[in-house]
Image (cartoon, rainbow, N blue to C red):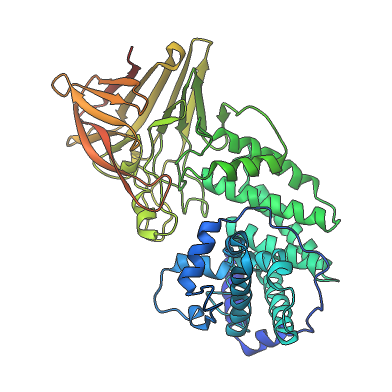
Amino acid sequence: MPLRLIQNLKSKAGQMACGSVLYNWSLSEKAPERLIVKPADVWEGNPEKGRHFLESCGATEDSGPVWYDHWWHYDGDNPVQIEILNSFEWLRDLRAQCGSLARNQGQQMICSWARSYPNWDKETWRGDITGRRLAMWISHHEYFCAGLPEEDEDLFFTSLIRQAKHLYNTLGTLEEIPFLQAARGLIYAGLAIEGRERWIENALNLLDQSLKEQVLPDGGHASRSPARQLQALQLLLDIKSALTAGDYPVPEDLSDTIARMSTALRFFRYGDRRLATMNASQEGEQEEIDSTLAQAGLRSKPLQSLPDSGYERMEMGRSLVLFDYGAAPKYPYDRYTHAGPLSFEFSYGKERLFVSCGTHPTSPEWCEALRATSAHNTASLDYRNAHEIRKDGHFGRRSASAHCERQETREAILIDASHNGYVSLNGITHMRRLYLTDEGNDFRGEDTFTSCIDLTRPVEIAIRFHLHPRITVSLVNNDTEALLRMPGGIGWRFKFGAGILVLEDSIYLGDESEARKTKQLVIYGHTTGEYASVQWSLKKEG
């Protein structure tokens, strides 16, 4: 029987058991009296977010902390918001806010949650959420729980050990990032509570198996997402730091994986020191990325290729191109990947010119919409996605193979790549050639479409170039060219060789939760035969 099927069966059986009185009874155990290890939370909180959280609670200096049991009972709220609230990761923001009000409000919320959910609950005891919550409770225990009344202290420790025992029972049913979040929580609990070494060993054994699947040989995450790469690396750094704090041996494979992942993360950084907005990613915060790489402890130049992840980096002068040629990831890592094969992003210095549309930090509707091929700098055929996005979020039809060749000299970089995501629909393979030369001031592309069958009707082609909101654009020379202007005044001229050039509206969700209006250049055309080609170029003015 396939391993994944076994895991799914175990998960369903586990859920049935978790909902029983017998299961909740099995979690009962004498609570510990103290925590012997308290791994530090090294990620800085945001004081402004802490202030906003207090306001949303209704807590003020005059009123004091607010008892908020009704927060834990929901009526059709946003599931992402529920997840964020129950993870307790906002504790670091309250701690950054400082002051007795923030401290007491966090303390009240911890005790309130423990009273509201003494037993397993399908939503709030989900493995990844429980792991995140345990990590926050343990690492911030000394700040928020020092001086608790004896009754509340017993409540805290009773809830802590019950949640940890649940994680120990169910950890093997989790996958991908949720597994890492749960494993971190169980390791923290195993280090913090005396005599729980078996929790640590169980988590490390499963972690070793999971990393062999999650982390590719080149150090990229199997989801091919820069943001999930950062998230996974941070979780592994937390685990390593906690083991060190508890004088527990750090597995050599874990240290090696952290080194490979940090090197791969540098690949996705632009001149503004932030991330590419490909595959469910936003730009992120420079300070957070710097802190992550500093903790990894390695300093090296970015790689120019991630062959297992399916990315190329073209860097010349002040110009930088990140090119996504990779095949669609396998299940379950395709859940957040975008349908943008052969898409690219282009930046010059600290400014971004051509960008993917990004993603949304909380809205499932925005996230799904921005996975479409049309939200990327690539070609779409007949207004269909290059990978079929099913209702469950995973891919149906997808590219079965991806091909890429790179040639490089001191004067130029040439990359040829292709994908066959459309072959099952119309027999067409999309090939893209990218060429960067003249110290990065001359960037050219050619999109070729070849069909292995006789087409019975024209196939519509749309090649899109989404612009960053800081870039201004106008069509010139009777709409046969486009002039792009960067904030500092530097100009670029866009030309094309076939089809019709149109300037259309677009949106950018690369750095915040509000969509920013921007523009996109679109070359429209069609193909009726075995071969069609569109050439285009971007050259710096002056």
Asked whether residue 73 is in view, the answer is: yes
**Residue 88: x percent and y percent?**
59, 67
**Residue 532: x percent and y percent?**
26, 24
Residue at screen point 61% across, 61% down? 92
Residue at screen point 52% across, 35% down? 310
**Residue 171: x percent and y percent?**
67, 66
Asked which quadrant contains residue 436, the reply is top left
**Residue 369: x percent and y percent?**
33, 52
The quarter of the rendered structure image containing the C terminus is top left
In the displayed structure, 31 sits above or below 287; it is below
Residue 261 falls left or right of residue 341: right
The image shows a total of numbered marks equal to 0
The quarter of the rendered structure image containing the N terminus is bottom right
In the displayed structure, 498 sits above or below 248; it is above
Asked which quadrant contains residue 105, the reply is bottom right
Residue 310 falls left or right of residue 155: left
In the displayed structure, 21 sits above or below 514; it is below
- As drawn, the residue found furthest toward the left would be 478
Asked whether residue 173 is in view, the answer is: no
Viewer-side residue, 259 vs 106: 106
Viewer-side residue, 31 vs 491: 491
- As drawn, the residue found furthest toward the front would be 62
Viewer-side residue, 348 vs 197: 348
